Amino acid sequence: MKLILSTSNIMGAGASIHRPTKSKSNTEIVSSLRSNFDVHSAPSTPTNGTTSITINGDSKPTPKASYKTWTRQANPTTLEIPALDFTSSSLQEEREQYDITLKLFYLPSTTSNPPTAAHRGAQTREALDLVLRDLHMPSVDLLIVSFPGIYFDEKEDCPDKLSTRGPVEATPEALESQIETWRTLENLYEEGLVKKLGVAELGHDRLKAFLERTGVKPSVDQINLRDCCSVPKDLMALAKSNGVELLVHNDCSNILPRGTVRELLGSGESGAGVLAEATKTGDKRKSLHGEESKNGSAQVEGLRGEVQPLWVVKYTAVVKNRGVVENKGYFAVAELTD
């Protein structure tokens, strides 16, 4: 089953000036998803205004609403968490008044066979379609793609700085596979859905190969300088001579690990209750007999299986003449298998 997770507009009712932030964007997406799930799964407040119940003389927080009441099964194989609502847009101006940027993270695969270019192309179209429907806009200005396992701060790109990125999260995909995926993105450019395409974390050699072997050249290369690394001179020269804008970011490559998704959707205190707890001795018997859980309420059966995040898209809509972020949010898709 496909799970579509969304944050809605994290700018809320207001907007903010577009300034760089030092906080990791995986912290932002995790907290935003959890907040959105909490809002939708909150129990209805009783007429007496109480937010707790008493069981066997003990006061317990009112249980969250069943996930079935605030999610939507769009079709037999797709579950929206929470239910998506595209009836209105928070954008108030005409299309030409906005700079709309998407960054699509292809997440690490746990299988020995990585996604094909066709699969990646379909994922990209789905991500773009969700954003366009949400914003009620016909196109975006810039689509940046991030491939798993690619890090700008490798020794060959930044020889004077020790890598501080921690353990390797995924094996880098072959350059040929990335270029095949890129060619599916060129179709979006040709169709007018995307005005510019960009890449992330490419050093001199990879960027040079992209420029030589692609039809629609990358307009942007977004790199993570981490602490104090300066941009290599050969990369600066290559980008300048080919009209590629170098931008700095602080995103995590694996922005939504599978363990984080299970925690967000799980049955724990901070989970949304969509996924059932891992099977333990006696759990099946308790479920069959409707026995109470630790918090004293009858357990609600969640979905069972292994969850694997596939991709995340981050999007921002900035009012050009004011530099104000009017809409910002995330969509993520994960697969639930037996």
Image (tube, rainbow, N blue to C red):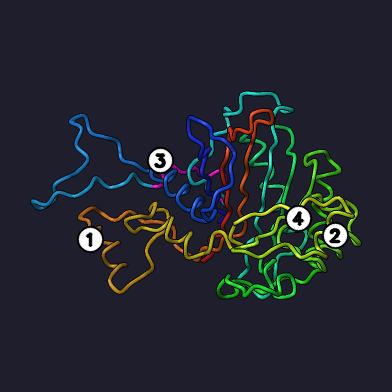
Q: Which mark is residue 237?
A: 2
Q: Amino acid at mark 3?
A: His
Q: Amino acid at mark 4?
A: Asp
Q: Quadrant of the N terminus?
A: bottom right
Camera-side mark, 4 or 1? 4
The residue that label 1 is drawn on is 294
Instruction: Give the residue at x 86% y 53%.
Output: 217
Please report whichever mark, 2 or 4, sits nearer to the chain's N-terminal start: 4
The residue that label 3 is drawn on is 40
Image-quadrant location for residue 276: bottom left
- Establish if 12 lies above or below 77: above
Residue 32 lies in the magenta-colored region? no
Q: Are marks 3 and 2 in contact (CB under 8 Å)?
A: no
Q: Amino acid at mark 1?
A: Lys
Q: Which mark is residue 62?
A: none
Camera-side residue: 90 or 87?
A: 90
